[in-house]
Amino acid sequence: MVNFGNSWDKVLMGEFDKPYYKQLRQFLINEYKTRTIYPNMYDIFNAMKLTPYEKVRAVMIGQDPYHGEGQAHGLCFSVKKGVNPPPSLVNIFKEIKDDTGIDNLGKHGELTKWAESGVLLLNAVLTVQAGNAGSHRGKGWETLTDTIISKLNERCEPIVFLLWGSYAKSKQPLITAPQHLILTAAHPSPLSAYNGFFGCRHFSKTNDFLIQKNLPPIDWSIDN
């Protein structure tokens, strides 16, 4: 039914046979037939496809995909090349520049390189109706993505969880294992970035922690 082509297939074995997911799947079949839904159905699981379970070193948690045309492609905060980076992503790039000196501003907003290097870019809800933010909340996606977070919590190797904004912070009770690092801050959106996202230095803190644990740091640059 769902095939990631990597270790997530084993980690989530049986999850897609559960009643909640079968119900979600029927809902999605109807939605994709009758409405404009983002992302493309073949991009829904890109976060897991690009970042296998054992490769995860950091996790970013978003709410649901961008609901504008051509933006969402299965990675939270990321947009396809050729699409202007949304304000939240611009603010993320600003903090990276202030924190690490890496300048991604003025480039594109596609974060595939991060995903391939170990950053799981996970939205809690993986689909959305065009122009209707939050329209697929409460349909079953949260059950799946909470399971994904819980499975990561079970991993022995340390992971950094970046929880920005109240929604992402609500996932903190799922992260209980002492080997992991939880970093919280305000959301990077223009409405809240000045309330504690700017200056959080989460990108250098993530790498300091990984290096301390003898793990390779994240390259926060993006391709040109």
Image: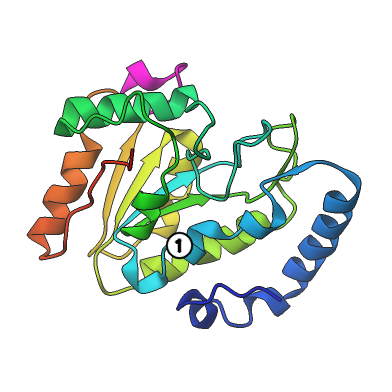
Q: Residue 43: x, y in percent?
A: 62, 55
Q: How many marks?
A: 1
In the visual, does 80 lie left or right of 92? right
Q: Residues within 10 Å of mark 1 (few under 14, many from 20)?
A: many
Residue 100, quarter of the rendered image: top left
Residue 174, quarter of the rendered image: bottom left
Q: Is 201 contained in the magenta span?
A: no
Looking at the image, residue 151 lies above or below residue 28: below
In the visual, does 198 lie left or right of 34? left
In the visual, does 38 lie left or right of 55? right
Residue 187 visible in rendering? no
> In the rendered view of the protein, which quadrant contains the N terminus?
bottom right
Look at mark 1 in the image and give the residue it sits on.
Answer: 50
The residue under label 1 is which amino acid type?
A: Leu
Q: Is 193 contained in the magenta span?
A: yes
Q: Residue 162: x, y in percent?
A: 34, 45
Looking at the image, residue 208 lies above or below residue 68: below
In the visual, does 20 lie left or right of 14? right
In the foreground, 60 or 5: 5
Q: Residue 2: x, y in percent?
A: 66, 73
Residue 178 visible in rendering? yes
Looking at the image, residue 224 lies above or below residue 122: above
In the foreground, 37 or 80: 80
Give the residue drawn at x 84%, y 57%: 27
Q: Secondary structure at mark 1?
A: helix
Looking at the image, residue 183 lies above or below residue 198: below
Task: Identify the main secondary structure in magenta.
Answer: loop
Q: Residue 152: x, y in percent?
A: 40, 67
Span highlighted in magenta in the image = 186-196
